[in-house]
Image (cartoon, grey):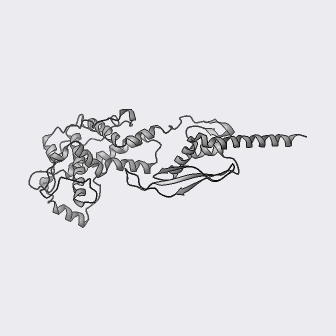
Amino acid sequence: MSKRSAPASPGQENKRQRHGPSSDENVVSTSTTPCLIPTMSALTPWLSSEIPSTLPPIPKILRPELEDTVFRHPGLSGLGPSYERLEWLGDAYLELMASSLIYQTFISTPSGRCSQLREMLIRNTTLAQYFRDYGLDAKAQLPGDFNRNISHGRGKSKDKDIIKIQADMFEAYVAAAIISDPENGMNNTASWLRLLWARTIRQYIMDNEKIPKPSCQSGSVNGPDGIASNSNISAKEKLRAEIGVKGILIRYEDMPRIGKDRDLGLPLYTVGVYLDGWGENNKLLATGTSLNKKEAAQKAAQKALDNKKLLKTYVAKKVAFKEATKAAEEANKMP
């Protein structure tokens, strides 16, 4: 994804010069075409039931001169405008659309995690892969010193160069598809990207649907032991309510890291939930792994709750303890 950076650094400026000068001839004229802001009509929350099994049809660019511009590298001077301005606009469209979809779908997800999901959708490797999936790389007009064959951009600087170019051209394509069709371009492109992105984060969408939605009720109903019972209570609170009493310690400890997230390349954290009490000492109940420690701890608590066989003994001991305590209190009240 191209960035909305300010003026280029000296190194960046030199890099641009190596691929050809930027001049007035490299500016595509779109002055008569309004730039459209995405509406919410096409950007509805993702649903796992709507994720396509195949690539969704790509919208067409209705203006031939814009389509030519999408695939023209800025290093090809004298052949017409390059993709640079369209790429700049498409970058903004993509970020706004991805942000809107994530915001509407992952309603209980922290903003930091939402940013990670968005990065997964609009990073260069993702967009370049889309570019190749649709066979658009065959249309790319590149200087002769570029090698079209890539190895997924791992370890080779030339691979990374072509992936960046393909991602830029994909962004330019998005912008051109939108502005070339003022009537339907925005909705068609937004609907297409919604389906295309859903394939990329399929598992995240499915996992999100398993999370209980926040309750609309202002009040809550008390469950056993007077503990408030509603969909907003966390897994850690539920575990405490299930087996905890005064003197019983449920603690969460960091565990050795197990690697990185395969999609984001970010470090994963693992947290274990331990029990001290009910005849146990330093008993590991479950572990949870996530991109942040708080979420990992909640996952550990949920896994412990899901292990009914494990908790059955501790729940029984808690019930027996409370009954004995109640009996003792009643006995003390007798004259």
Task: Residue at the far top: name it.
Answer: 49
The image shows residue 135 at horizontal and vertical percentages of: 20, 43
Residue at the image position 30 percent from the left and 48 percent from the top: 126
Q: How many marks?
A: 0
Task: Residue at the far right: name it.
Answer: 335
| 102 lies above or below 18 | above
Frontmost residue, 188 versus 47: 47
Quadrant (top left/top right/bottom left/bottom right) for the C terminus: top right
Relative to 237, 56 lies left or right:
left
Asked if residue 328 can be seen in this view, the reply is yes
Frontmost residue, 83 versus 278: 278
Relative to 163, 200 lies left or right:
right
Relative to 197, 184 lies left or right:
left
Asked if residue 47 can be seen in this view, the reply is no
Frontmost residue, 55 versus 43: 55
The image shows residue 68 at horizontal and vertical percentages of: 14, 45
The image shows residue 320 at horizontal and vertical percentages of: 73, 41
Task: Residue at the far bottom: name it.
Answer: 10
The image shows residue 239 at horizontal and vertical percentages of: 61, 44
Residue at the image position 49 percent from the left and 39 percent from the top: 211
| 198 lies above or below 249 | above
